[in-house]
Image (spheres, helix red, strand yellow):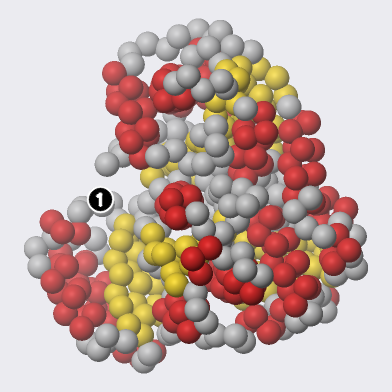
Amino acid sequence: MTKYFGTDGVRAVAGEFPLTDDFIEKLGFCALKELLAWAGSEKLKKQVIIARDTRLSGPSILEALSKGIRAAGADVLDMGISPTPSVAEAVKQTGSICGVVISASHNPAEFNGIKFFSNKGTKLPEELEEKIETAIESTKENSQPIGSYREAKELVEGYKNFLKATVDASLLKGTKVVLDCANGAAYKIAPEVFESLGMQVVLMADQNNGAQINEGVGALHTSKMRTLVKAEQAYAGFSFDGDADRVIASDEQGRQLDGEYIISAAALALKEQGKLPHNKAVMTVMTNLGCINYLKDHGVNMVLTPVGDKYVSQALEKEGLAVGGETSGHIIFPAYSNTGDGILSALQFLQLAKKSGLSMSEFALRWQKYPCELRAIMVKEKKPLESLPGFMDEIQKLENRLSEKGRIFVRYSGTEPKLRILVEGEDASLVSQLAQEAENLYRSKTEEK
């Protein structure tokens, strides 16, 4: 089990451990040493692609990280402010040893994070993360930089060209869309891509403003985007998160279409085209039962993974499947990318909608979510749930009250100090009651008040 790496890299409040200069430098150094050993005899360029979002702490983290990477003997190519998936794509295109993104994704501005991509554009496996952590704890002194550093803006242009090549511009020309860039990594690239494809673009939260990244906007806060879609009479709207690896959509009526709606629409479209291997798609255990049952009724079975797009990616690769993702808007189309890409997913959803000749609201009305309640409890310590006397047995008793027509799922967040409680069922009032009882139960078994 990893100590510093969560479900999406190393993440904390910037300046607080482990996001301190000394640790970051050691992380860069040790990660590169382990990645070089892991790559073995593969003929890869001894260089690392780095990008960041707009957070104010990004440049200082870049400096410390770059120092450690260069001390390990690798060169650093800096893409500047650019979406997370742009690094995954650039690493594959350039044959680099790995890629690194400095971002805390959807988290508030005071947080930041560091996540690595392998030479194949995938998140690192846990066993490699564990080796890196072991190396960090045994490294006493920092070495001096050997490798070089340079800006690599041409890689950003390459990413934009890649995105445009995934769709038929003639289908999208003239389409009016609202883009909410979360004042993050997509603030410049997303508008340029959509406009270059001939679309009418209405922008919001499109500033290089790291102090307000995700603040009341973006994939976790879509209400302003959805209101603007209705006011502008747009065909659709899209909210990206801070590093643009996820997207939440809106139909023309301002109804939210999360990752489940996008994935289910894509899965059925691919099935109709004969391009959905084994008639399967991948989602996480947090996927709403309404979506799972809808797809099952239409001949699509689900492979359910733990929460985290790296687990979705691993399942897609293992079974050779064509689409998967998370409710939160991390969506992966392996034909194009091995990681979640908000801009790519928005373009793919738009294209399939335009090909179908349907309005976006048609996708919102295809199925309904089961009533659900998701609670997040701030915790001081993530005590193993199995170690809390009687807790899991009591949770099972609560779930039994749903009479096999719902579920209760309890887990700790992999990126924040929170316990998440998900309750789903056909009866909304019972769902709410059980969510409260589950929360009370956890608090009674711990010191969290």
Q: Work out whether residue 382 or residue 92 is closer to the camera in this orientation and state it.
A: 92
In the image, 431: left or right of 371?
A: left
Q: Quadrant of the C terminus?
A: bottom left
Q: Residue at 52%, 82% (x, y): give it.
A: 298
**Where is residue 212 drawn, in percent x and y?**
64, 51
Residue 65 visible in the picture: yes
Q: Position of residue 208 (x, y in %)?
A: 73, 45
Side of 292 where 197 appears, left or right: right
Q: Is residue 318 above or below residue 86?
A: below
In the image, 147 versus 231, the foreground residue is 147
Where is mark 1, residue-wise? 381
Q: Amino acid at mark 1?
A: Glu
Q: Is residue 202 above or below residue 196?
A: below
Image location (x, y in percent) of residue 357: 79, 80
Numbered disc total = 1
Secondary structure under the numbered disc 1 in the rendered image: loop
Please provide percent x and percent y for residue 14: 49, 37
Q: Nearer the viewer, residue 180 or 305?
A: 305
Q: Is residue 177 left or right of residue 368?
A: right
Please report the residue visible at 78 percent of the width from the left and 31 percent of the height from the top. 154
Instruction: State whether residue 214 appears in this view.
Output: no
